[in-house]
Amino acid sequence: MNELLLIVTIAGERVALPSAAVESVVELDTLIPVPRAASHVAGLSALRSRVLTVIDCMCSLELGSTDCSDGIREAAVVELDGHHYALLVDAVEDVVEALAEPTPVRAAMGRGWERVANGMVETESGPLLLIDVAALVAGLEVRAA
């Protein structure tokens, strides 16, 4: 398998995002709140003359919320259905190659992780949970629908 993966940390856990889904990795310093938005939408931010909907990954995973009061936050920018999203992450680590196809997760995880998991994938830095970016962006609304 030749798929490249972006290793990020979300809620203290190292996980993998398919790099084909990631347009860029950025640091966000301005976040504008959006009244009446879903709870996992942290707000809006601007990047190179385009508006990004900022997704709080911790909130999407039902693990609390990210503290954005300290200023600059790292984010992975993705595009889904013509809309750009910035996924707030704790840290961005590296891009690695998947060594095999994803396999089913054989351990109990929290509901949020189970909702966004596409399986475990083996990499040179060990096994990582492969995240479904669309499910992460959708948040709890997927389960409610």
Image (cartoon, rainbow, N blue to C red):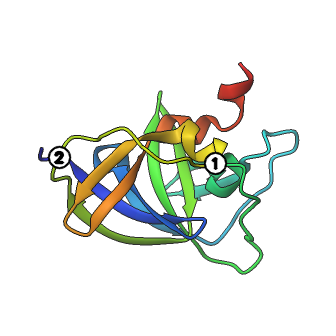
Label ID, residue 110: 1
Q: Give amino acid for label 1.
A: Gly
Calculate the distance from the C-alpha at mark 2 to the C-alpha at mark 1: 25 Å
Q: Is residue 42 left or right of residue 108?
A: right
The secondary structure type at the circle numbered 2 is loop
| Camera-nearest residue between 58 and 118 | 118
- Residue sticking out furthest to the left: 2
Label ID, residue 47: none
Closer to the chain start, of discs 2 and 1, is 2
The C terminus - image quarter: top right
Residue at 42% across, 44% down? 106
Percent position of residue 16, x then y: 38, 55
> 120 above or below 15?
above
| Camera-nearest residue between 30 and 119 | 119
Q: Is residue 106 left or right of residue 88?
A: left
At label 2, counting other C-alpha atoms closer than 10 Å, the crowd grade (few under 14, some 14-19, many 20 or more) is: few
Residue at 63% across, 44% down? 112
The secondary structure type at the circle numbered 1 is loop
Percent position of residue 20, x then y: 28, 44
At label 1, counting other C-alpha atoms closer than 10 Å, the crowd grade (few under 14, some 14-19, many 20 or more) is: few
Q: Which residue is mark 2?
A: 100
The N terminus - image quarter: top left
Percent position of residue 75, x then y: 52, 62
> 97 above or below 138?
below
Q: Is residue 140 left or right of residue 106?
A: right
Q: Give amino acid for label 2.
A: Ala
Percent position of residue 105, x then y: 41, 43
